[in-house]
Amino acid sequence: MAFAGVSKWFGDLVAVSEVSFELWPGVTALLGPNGAGKSTVLRLLAGLTPPSRGQVRVLGRDPRGDVEITRQIGLAPQQEAMFDRLTAYDFVRLAAVLHHLDAPDDATRRAIDLVELGPAASRRIGTFSKGMRQRVKLAQAIVHDPHLVVLDEPLTGLDPRQRLSMIELVARLGQGGRCVIVSSHVLEEVERFGSRILVIAQGRLAAEGDFHAIRNLMDDRPRRFAVRVERANEVGAALVRWGLAVGVQLEGPDRLIVQTREPAAFRRWIAPLTRDLGCRLREVAPLDEDLESVFRYLVEGR
Amino acid sequence: MTTPTSPTAGSNPAARSRGRTGTGGELYGLFLSILGTRGRIVGLGLLSLISVLVGVVFRAQLDPADQLESWTKFANTFGLSLVAPVVALMFASAALGGPAEDGTLVYLWLRPVSRLRLALAAYAASLTYVAPLVVIPLGVGALLSGAERGAVTGTVASATIAVMTYSGIFLWLGLRTRRSLAWGLAYILIWEGFVAMAGKSAARLAIRAYTRSLLADSSGVDLRLATITPAYAAIVPLVVAVVAVLLTARRLRTTEVT
């Protein structure tokens, strides 16, 4: 499975820009903030949309133009819409039949067991909760035992126990030799999916590789804090002198923006330091703890 | 949670079928389920029933000498110009257009099924609703109106040709544009309504001219601009229907699936 210099634009909007990567058996997590281009990457991979430039290959074949390659692709899309008037069983069985399986009922029961739908399978999908719909989507994606399993935000709407089950199942699918690619915008979720991740931000591949290496890179980035404190200039100078800040920006007599590579030490020592200086500390607020800022750092730091 | 049963990915050739029978039937059943909403069937069924009521009124109120001409003109203006295209639009445009719009098309598109088979299943399911809703009430209305046998035959034949053709056109339109209802109504009112009445040559570009000619020929009633010979009047619309289904299959191959 390969992306080679793939770009995708819709009019003036560039959704994916010059993205290249390869997938191999196991779980690969596609991490990125909302709107980063994750779903577009997955749609390109499944052949649902053609690349504007570059080449997408699944088992060496073009997923866009080769209908037969869909036998090897299972997709659980992000959107919730399904054929709500069908029962879950009929919906999954429909996928089995359209994949020309010899024993569609056996395959359907197996897939439904895997996602733990059990007795609910005889109910209409329209009556299902979001979590149950996610499981039905996964069941139809794996009923034909594909090589490539594409899961777009599969944990959305699941409760903690269902999340755990889903993560375990995804891991098993990867261990079984399939290429499983899972998208998420939640860092902590991705950590549990597997060790390999692709980080996408603003349509570009920001980082690729082992999760822990990238996590360390994320953790090592400078952090910024807004500090409201009396005699801010004195406090700023002391922070730099003590090695708690690599940069200080004075924004007023009582407001500082502090840049630090030691966020834990900064948090621990800012209060004692200001007390020793006799300055009243009013507020310390992190400015870039959100995931978007992490991605921004990865993109701009390349 | 249970673990996957097969140890290696995609390594289960026994699970692959050797035949492809059944996919067409499954797709057809699915499209029937998608299209068969109560509101759509009841609403359009009531519209079609007007034909039956008018047939009864014609028989009761009109002089027998006038029944043939009155019914033929009514079948042309109401049945062929309004009911047939509108009912076809409401069903056929939703067959693939609905799934394309709500995002469920992906569950059909990402399967090893030929696009022509998909298009044919959607077309057949549309016709399953449209033909009875249009042809039967018009046929019954023709019978009840007291019109001669030729008018009954002409009504049924022209309505059948009309629904087959319009269903094909609107099946394609539903996939071609997100505003298929608006475009379809514009087509019915402006193109079929205006062009079909604009002149002898221009009328040949509208389906209505062909169905009107079939009706006029069978009933013997003179209808304005009904000048196409029966063979052409039957064949050309059916060719249009075939081309429309093929274009739909082509569109399925090239469409961006959301």
Image (cartoon, rainbow, N blue to C red):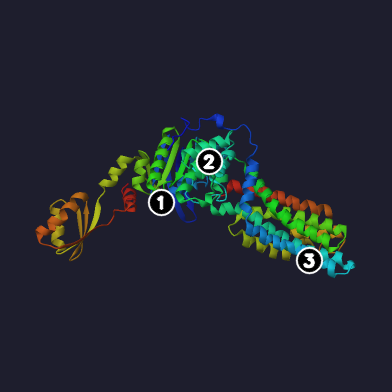
Relative to B7, residue B172 above or below: below
- The chain holding disc 3 is B
Indicate which disc residue A36 carries. 1
Within 10 angstroms of label 3, few (less than 14), some, or many (20 or more) residues? Answer: some
Residue A272: image location, x then y, percent? 13, 55
What residue is at 63 percent from the left and 43 percent from the top?
B26
The kind of residue on which mark 3 rests is Val
Residue at 43 percent of width and 46 percent of height: A154
Badge 2: chain ID = A
Q: Which residue is mark 2?
A: A63
Circle 2 crowding by C-alpha within 10 Å: few under 14, some 14–19, many from 20: many
Q: Chain of mark 1?
A: A
Q: Which residue is mark 3?
A: B54
In the image, residue A59 sits, relative to residue B169, either above or below, namely: above
Instruction: Give amino acid for label 1.
Output: Ala
Q: Secondary structure at mark 1?
A: loop
Q: Amino acid at mark 2?
A: Pro
Residue A150 visible, this angle: yes
How crowded pointer 1 is (Cα within 10 Å; few <14, some 14-19, many 20+) is rated as many
Measuring from the top left, give residue A73's x and y in whole percent. Answer: 51, 39
- Point out the tag, 2 or 1, that comes first from the N-terminus: 1
Identify the residue at the far front of this view.
A119
| Of the pair B115 and B129, the residue shown nearer to us | B129
Estimate the spatial distance between the alpha carbons at disc 1 and disc 3, rounded to whole Å: 60 Å
